Amino acid sequence: MTTLPTHWRWLDLGDLAPVELHAAYTGVARAMGPEDAPVLLWARSDRPHLSIGASQYAAADLDLGRCEALGIPVIQRPLGGGTVWVDGDQECFFFILPRQRVPGGHRGLFDRCLGLVADWFDALGLGVRRVGGQDLWLGARKILGSGAASQGEALVFGASVLRHFPARSFTECIRAPSDGFRDWLAEALAEGMTDWRSQGIDPDTGLLQAGLRETCAGQAGWRFTDWQPDPRTRATMAEAREELAEPLDPSPGRRHVPEGIRINGLRYLLEQDRGGDWLRVLLDDGIIRRVASADPASHAALRACQGEPAHAGRLRAVLGDALPAARASDLASRLEALHASIPS
């Protein structure tokens, strides 16, 4: 039976430029052989940047002109997931293991690593729970998202300690269909996300690292040896750096969430515009929490939809009490279609 290795190499790279940060874990993974000891890599970004998932199109999800004007680089990481803001207020960590030694593959990696991270957070005063397979929440708010990918013969699991999340700065970089969408996004992020400082907890780097190592030792029996990359690993890191520094794909492609953006594992902000007849909705686990329309009469009628599921077929009846049947049916169909556009 395959079991996770217990001897790990610990690699602390300190502050890195954005490209260097993502090249570090990529290069370590690509240099790893089937029998090599796994690596737990720790680093911070020396400046703010946006990291998009491996399958995303930057021009579809981000306002690249605004990012450039604000001096915010965009890096397409080899890990999955959506758009992530990364800056010096985050402590990034990556579990990198030979793929054939991970029971259950990607799912097994998430199960083991997220479980350890949850125990680590709990030991430092944050009683989190796992939501949606890849996230950790504190109460009703997300405090950690994670991603994983295969690189060479290795699997990589990455996440970060979010000391502070600048919701407005992140929002300024998103490709938004309207100013109203951007305003709602900032408000929804503030409600749907939290960070360590908001909880009154802000341990220094040394305490965080010690806590993670102690949790891994106590819960999984792992032992760590400090390590620095060998020449072969440094060479693969340099190769990854060159790849990541290449220009982003300029094609518009498709948004990660076709009609909007994911706030957390359950909450989505969506907007559809038909020649000025826009419809905007905030969904929370399929329930309409906030909704608005360009048309004043429709806007007033849509208030009755708040608290209703967007997928249960009740919206036509709810709207039909205040609007002509054709308009009620059209709005209901659009809301249902927006809900259906959310990736499963």
Image (cartoon, rainbow, N blue to C red):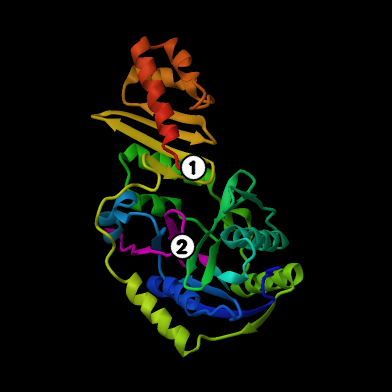
Whether residue 77 can be seen here: yes
Say if 153 sits above or below 125 in the image.
Answer: below
Q: Which residues are magenta?
A: 69-92
Measuring from the top left, give residue 328's x and y in whole percent. Answer: 39, 16
Which circle marks residue 79 in the picture?
2
Residue that lies at the very extreme toward the front in this rendered image: 1
Picture layout, residue 255 above or below residue 95:
above
In front: 162, or 40? Answer: 40
- Look at the image and tell me in which quarter the N terminus lies: bottom right
Q: Tag 2, which secondary structure?
A: loop
Q: Earlier in the sequence, mark 1 or mark 2?
A: 2
Q: Position of residue 65 (x, y in %)?
A: 25, 56
Which residue does the numbered mark 1 point to in the structure image? 344
Tell me: 129 left or right of 258: right
Residue 70 lies in the magenta-colored region = yes
Q: Is residue 143 above or below residue 294?
A: below
